[in-house]
Amino acid sequence: MQPIEIYYKELEEKEILSREEEESLYPLLAIDPNARKRLVEANLKIALKSARSFQRKNPKYELIELISEANLGLAVAIERFEPSKGFRFSTYAQCWINNRLNQYDLFNHSAVPAPKRAYYKSKKISFLKGKDTPLKEILDEVGCTQDDMEQIEQISSRSYVPIDEFHEETISDPNDTSLESVDEQDLLSKVEQLINDSNVLKDKERLCLTALYGFGSQEKQSQASLAAKLNQSTEEIRTIQRNALKQLQTILA
């Protein structure tokens, strides 16, 4: 039996906690190692799901390696989790799992940053597809072959992160959180590291940016869906997002 198969078998035997059971462990986390162990083991399947999702987007990595990284993120989460902050451990852990996977990719990939024009072409392709434009018309409009189009979309999805607030000297509208992409790989690295740095952002700020902009293996979430998940208003999420972006902008200025 392969190691991954053994791990799957062990995982099947792990207890799944209800929300009430999970929350009953929170008061014990600071004093009872068994409570921490139980909570971590109950969330191992979340780490596995994240690792699988990440591998689908990054097939160059072995699944067993990604599972290991995801579990390390889970270990960080249990050490830093503060129930008084108001969100569930599973939600908090997902943030750290995604950050760990994203950091692993950041320090192990060797891809050359895509030219900025590929990003703008990809946006044009997305716009035309959204209007149900026939494929031939899209190719003529963008000026590329179908193979080129697929490559542009792949490069753009892997090499760009929305971070215009991180490098613009001014923000014309303080309520505007729309983002454009840049292709400076060193800036991307700095942003990722700052988001992962516990001394820069508060836990909720880190969680919000990770969810709203889809860092790591996480799909982008809307402000409304994240607000519902964290039991907060959309305006509160928008404020957290805006404050976090301003902090990163100041550091990177």
Image (cartoon, helix red, strand yellow):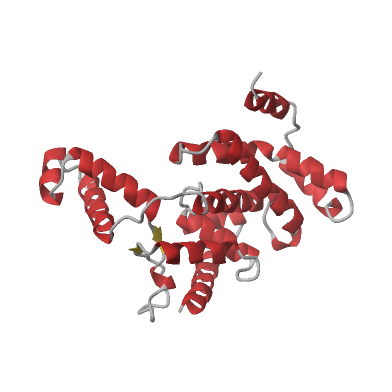
Q: Is residue 20 visible?
A: no
Q: Is residue 143 above or below residue 15?
A: below
Q: Is residue 57 above or below residue 187?
A: above
Q: Residue at x 38, y 69 (%)?
A: 164
Q: Is residue 235 above or below residue 60?
A: below
Identity of the residue furthest to the front in this view: 110
Q: Viewed as shown, does residue 94 lie left or right of 223? A: right
Number of numbered discs: 0
x and y, in percent, of residue 188 in the image? 44, 62
Identity of the residue furthest to the right in this view: 31
Q: Nearer the viewer, residue 214 or 60?
A: 60
x and y, in percent, of residue 240 in the image? 55, 69
x and y, in percent, of residue 115 in the image? 28, 58
Identity of the residue furthest to the top in this view: 1
Q: Viewed as shown, does residue 16 lie left or right of 233? A: right
Q: Which image quadrant is residue 2 in?
A: top right
Q: Is residue 223 visible?
A: yes
Q: Residue at x 53, y 51 (%)?
A: 102
Q: Residue at x 33, y 45 (%)?
A: 154
Q: Nearer the viewer, residue 225 or 100?
A: 100
Quadrant showing the C terminus: bottom left
x and y, in percent, of residue 208 in the image? 55, 60
Q: Residue at x 89, y 49 (%)?
A: 32
Quadrant showing the N terminus: top right
